[in-house]
Image (cartoon, rainbow, N blue to C red):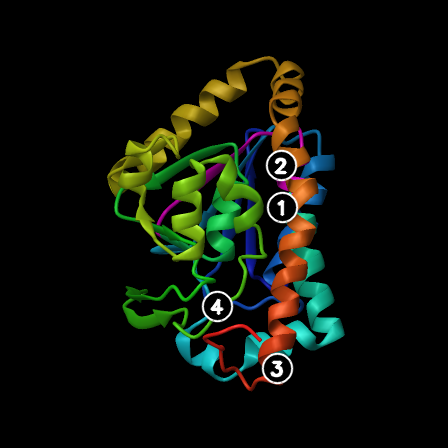
Amino acid sequence: MADDEYLKIEVQRQVATITMRFGVRSSKSPGWALAEVFENLRRDNSVRVLILTGEGDAFSLAPTCDSYRSGFAYDNGVNPAKAWYTFNGIARTIETMVGMEKPIIARVNGDAIGFGQSLVFACDFIVAVEDALIMDHHMGGTLAGTYFGQPRETGAEEFNAPPGDGGMALVPLYMTPCKAKEYLLLAKGYTAAELAAMNVINYAVPVDQLDGKVSEITDALLKRNPYTVPWTKRVTNRMVVNHVNLTLDAGMAYELAYFGHQKQTNGVNPTSLG
């Protein structure tokens, strides 16, 4: 089910835990690998609840600053095969997450940047360690941190792409219009504690309480009727599904247009129109 060991899948007592492995690459794209897993688990009636998390001290990070400056993102966007696996994988992942009947819990064990934060907001319950940074980096957001004991600089100021991998489709459902635009247009990151105070996520907890809170929600879901839980999610998420259907493809198209633009300008962002 997993692709190139990027994803680790564990199933216990009707709960599937999907762990994204930092630093392990999928042969096609992370989105493609995730889409296959979510689609398979949606069909598996032995699984009632899903948990999505990261390995170690990061939930999911954006590419490094050096990789953006190498031009890999633009090449990925204008190469038909790479763009297909990247953006079709993203669409299938987000659409399956919000459309599937089974509840998904985001166990945010560390920073969630870029596509990682889109995955967080596609979940039904969000529980995060209180100091985890959640940010859509597309519009020039950067982050320097230490992960697995190694320094890493994520994102690049010169990367100014429309947030096409789910940010534009999902974030406006969680924040007021003004806050959503500040978050997306200025790449303003928030800690989980700040987002919990804003009532954007369910819980921000100390790291030693993360598993306890996730288990509390999981146990409560498993005590409910196995038919009525999925029906309730299906109806409650109808607005989310409709909004994703209206906006996700447009967001991906604008990001792809940006990649083509950057390819023509050798990665230089203009400062005026015309």
**Few, some or many C-alpha atoms within 10 Å of disc 3 (few <14, some 14-19, many ≥20)?**
some
Could you tell me how far apart the alpha carbons at marks 1 and 2 are, in whole angstroms? 6 Å
Disc 4 to disc 2, how far (Cα)?
Answer: 27 Å
Q: Which mark is residue 160?
A: 4
Among the two numbered marks 2 and 3 on one chain, the one whose residue lies closer to the N terminus: 2
Q: Nearer the viewer, mark 1 or mark 3?
A: 3
Marks 1,2: beta carbons within 8 A: yes
For marks 4 and 2 on the same chain, the one whose residue lies earlier in the sequence: 2
Q: Tell me which amino acid carries mark 2.
A: Val
Q: Tell me which corner region of the image, top left, top right, bottom left or bottom right, holds residue 39.
A: top right
Q: Are marks 4 and 2 in contact (CB under 8 Å)?
A: no
Dot 4 lies on which element? Answer: loop
Between marks 4 and 3, how big is the CA–CA gap?
13 Å
- Name, please, the residue furthest toward the front: 274
Which-is-in-front pick, marks 2 and 3? 3
Q: Which segment did they paint magenta?
A: 95-110
Instruction: Name the residue type under label 3.
Output: Lys
Label of residue 263 in the image: 3
Circle on res. 121: none
Task: Check residue 94 in the rendering and tell me which mark sits there, or answer none.
Answer: 1
